[in-house]
Image: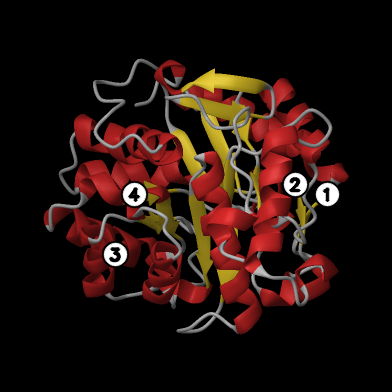
Amino acid sequence: MTGDTAVPVVTGAVRAAGLLHTVAGPLSAADVRGPVLAHEHLALDLSRGSGPKAVLAARHRAAVAAELAVLRRDFGLSLVVELTCRGMGRDLAALARIAAASGVAVVAATGWYYERFHPPEVVGAAPEVLARSLVEEIEDGRGGIRPGVIGEIGSHGDRPSEPESRVLRAAALAARATGLAVVTHAGLGRGGRAQLELLTAAGLAPHRIAIGHQDLLDDPAVHRELAAAGAYVCFDTIGKEHYRSDAARLRLLLALVEAGHADRALLSCDVSRHGYLVGAGGGGYGHLFRSFVPRLRAAGADEELIDGLVRRNPLRFLTGRDGEWGGAAGGAFR
């Protein structure tokens, strides 16, 4: 049975043009006037595969909400794309509480991470079966909350494993059925080409795909290739200096911009454990705005370019509407 016949065509859940699904309900992309964090985690539990520190648990909720509220006040932060999916300790109710407490809209995700974190439902399941499960969640929601993005769909190494390949194909099928975009996790930046090849082979348009963690791969040629194909290139671990310096990230980003692909870059910090929070001594969710963006300006980036990188690009990606959401920012970003 093919993906086209196995995956139901969704009518009620297909995203209306320019409309985002947030944990508080629909939001027009045209109303997002401040910056967007394109790849973050607000509540997760990766302790099963990464150790006890890889959590953002209930005891951290107040600190997370407080950080976002400060960023909303100081930089006009308008939206967070929260990419904790199945098998990562996703807590949709917690996301709704954090959004309400901070005043920052949150888009929740669905899908499966890389193989180490696959739950039992993935084992041996055909891509069409997995896709149906995603489509049902996107259409019906859980606890009244519907996902607004599929991700972060993971793989490690230069080629996805067999289970990871099935999950990537399922993500593509579900994205085709629902109109949502797909964000990947490319371990240490590797395997992005293979991810893009697999997703597009399943019929998903490149502009609805964002290849994750490319700032961990010091290969500008790969970045250009992904962008030239039409995919988004994620510089989404900004501030994680133990992986790569922000100076190197800035160099890689500027190379992509200078190659003519400024409209294909997405920026974020990927806060994925409580030690990254400001209260624990980390850079927090605001490192992008407090540290990296000023370095971009110092390197010659103007406000139009910065607004594109932190607002217009993620909105185009989430809505699948290339060339829209232009114009100057209306929020307090500076």
Question: Which corner quadrant holds the C terminus?
Answer: top left
Label 3: few (<14), some or many (≥20) within 10 Å?
A: many
> Can residue 47 be seen in this snapshot?
yes
Q: Secondary structure at mark 3?
A: helix
- What residue is disc 4 on? 207
Tell me whether circle 2 and circle 1 mark residues in contact (CB < 8 Å): yes
In this rendered view, identify the residue nearer to me: 11 or 244.
Answer: 11
In this rendered view, identify the residue nearer to me: 78 or 161.
Answer: 161
- What residue is disc 1 on? 57
* Structural distance between the alpha carbons of marks 2 and 4: 28 Å
* Structural distance between the alpha carbons of marks 3 and 4: 10 Å
Q: Earlier in the sequence, mark 2 or mark 4?
A: 2
User: Which residue lies at the image location 59% right of the left edge and 83% below the top edge?
Assistant: 161
User: Which residue lies at the image location 59% right of the left edge and 41% below the top edge?
Assistant: 9
Tell me whether circle 3 and circle 4 mark residues in contact (CB < 8 Å): no
Tell me whether circle 2 and circle 3 mark residues in contact (CB < 8 Å): no
- What residue is disc 2 on? 43
Horizontal and vertical percent position of residue 27 = 55, 20
Residue type for callout 1: Ala
